[in-house]
Image (cartoon, grey):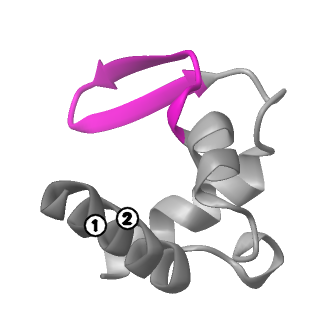
Amino acid sequence: MQLFGLAYNLANFLRRLALPKGIRQWSLTTLREKLVKIGAKVTWHSKYVFFQLEEVAVPRRLFAAILERIGRL
């Protein structure tokens, strides 16, 4: 039970710090479905890593903003 509480608190903490204001009110279930359960292909070119994903789930600018905020943590 403690592990579930820790996971919930960590996800809630990241939601408050890393997400733009427009989607902070999304539930953790919605975040999981739209951000985690996406079909993405990860490719490397020289020293850069690229995520190739469909824009159906999350728009490119929103996904980039989230990654930028996570990088600043």
Q: Nearer the viewer, residue 20 or 49?
A: 20
Residue 57 in the magenta stretch? The answer is: no
Q: Which residues are magenta?
A: 36-52
Instruction: Please indicate whether residue 61 sits to the left or right of residue 12 in the image.
Output: right
Q: Tell me which amino acid carries mark 2.
A: Tyr
Expressed as whole percent of the image width and height from the top left, the position of residue 22 reads 83, 76
Task: Determine which residue is flagged by label 1.
Answer: 5
Number of marks: 2
Q: How far apart are the alpha carbons under marks 1 and 2?
A: 5 Å
Expressed as whole percent of the image width and height from the top left, the position of residue 54 reads 73, 21
Residue at 27% from the left image edge and 56% from the top image edge: 4
Instruction: Please indicate whether residue 17 sits to the left or right of residue 61 in the image.
Output: left
- Determine the secondary structure under disc 2: helix
Please tell me whether the stretch drawn in magenta is mainly helix, strand or loop. strand
Residue at 56% from the left image edge and 22% from the top image edge: 52
Q: Tell me which amino acid carries mark 1.
A: Gly
Q: Is residue 44 above or below residue 50?
A: above
Instruction: Please indicate whether residue 29 sits to the left or right of residue 70 in the image.
Output: right
Given contact means CB atoms under 8 Å apart, are the residues at marks 1 and 2 in contact? yes
Instruction: Please indicate whether residue 43 sits to the left or right of residue 23 in the image.
Output: left
- Determine the secondary structure under disc 1: helix
Residue 56 sits in quarter: top right
Expressed as whole percent of the image width and height from the top left, the position of residue 55 reads 80, 30
Task: Determine which residue is flagged by label 2.
Answer: 8
